[in-house]
Amino acid sequence: MTRRPVVTTHRQAKAFCISGCTLHYLPRSVPPQSLSLNRRIDELQHEYLFVCSRMLLDD
């Protein structure tokens, strides 16, 4: 029986050029209210392309 060399998560991350933290990250669900708010902000930014974010907050 031949043993395979152990490849650590640090080496795997380095091989794929990603941060080691992303290998241990567990995604969390996003509340629907946050999704709808983010969608509305995106719509406003596309509607008013040349308006800065501070002006959108006053709207």
Image: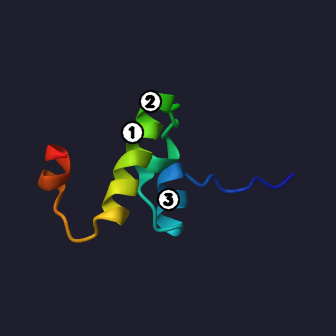
**Which colour scheme appears in the figure?**
rainbow
Q: In the picture, residue 52 is in which quadrant?
A: bottom left
The answer to whether residue 26 is left or right of residue 58 is: right
Precedes in sequence: disc 1 or disc 3? 3
| Residue 49 percent location from the top left of the image | 28, 69
Crowding at dot 1, Cα within 10 Å, few <14 / some 14-19 / many 20+, comes out as few
The amino acid sitting under disc 1 is Leu
The reply to whether the C-beta atoms of the residues labelled 2 and 1 are less than 8 Å apart is yes
Q: Residue 1 got which mark?
A: none
- The residue depicted at 31 percent of the width and 60 percent of the height is 45
Whether residues under marks 3 and 2 lie with C-beta atoms below 8 angstroms apart, the answer is: no
Q: Residue furthest front?
A: 59
Q: Name the residue under label 3.
A: 13
Q: Residue at x 40, y 55 (%)?
A: 43
Instruction: Look at the numbered disc 1 and give the secondary structure of its residue.
Output: helix
Most foreground residue, 10 or 33:
33
Q: Is residue 29 above or below residue 9?
A: above
The foreground one among 17 and 29 is 29
Q: Going by the picture, which residue comes out furthest to the right?
A: 1
**Looking at the picture, how far across and down is residue 51, in whole percent?**
19, 64
Question: Which residue is tagged 2?
Answer: 33
Label of residue 37 in the image: 1
Label 3: how many Cα within 10 Å (few below 14, some 14–19, many 20+):
some
**Quarter location, residue 44:** bottom left
Closer to the eye: label 1 or 3:
1
Amino acid type indicated by mark 3: Ala
Depth check, mark 3 against mark 2: the one in front is 2
Nearer to the camera, 22 or 49: 49
Report how far apart the C-alphas of labels 3 and 2 lie in the structure: 34 Å
Q: Which residue is drawn at 66% across and 56% down?
A: 5
- Is residue 28 toward the left or the right of residue 45 in the image? right
CA–CA distance between discs 1 and 3?
34 Å
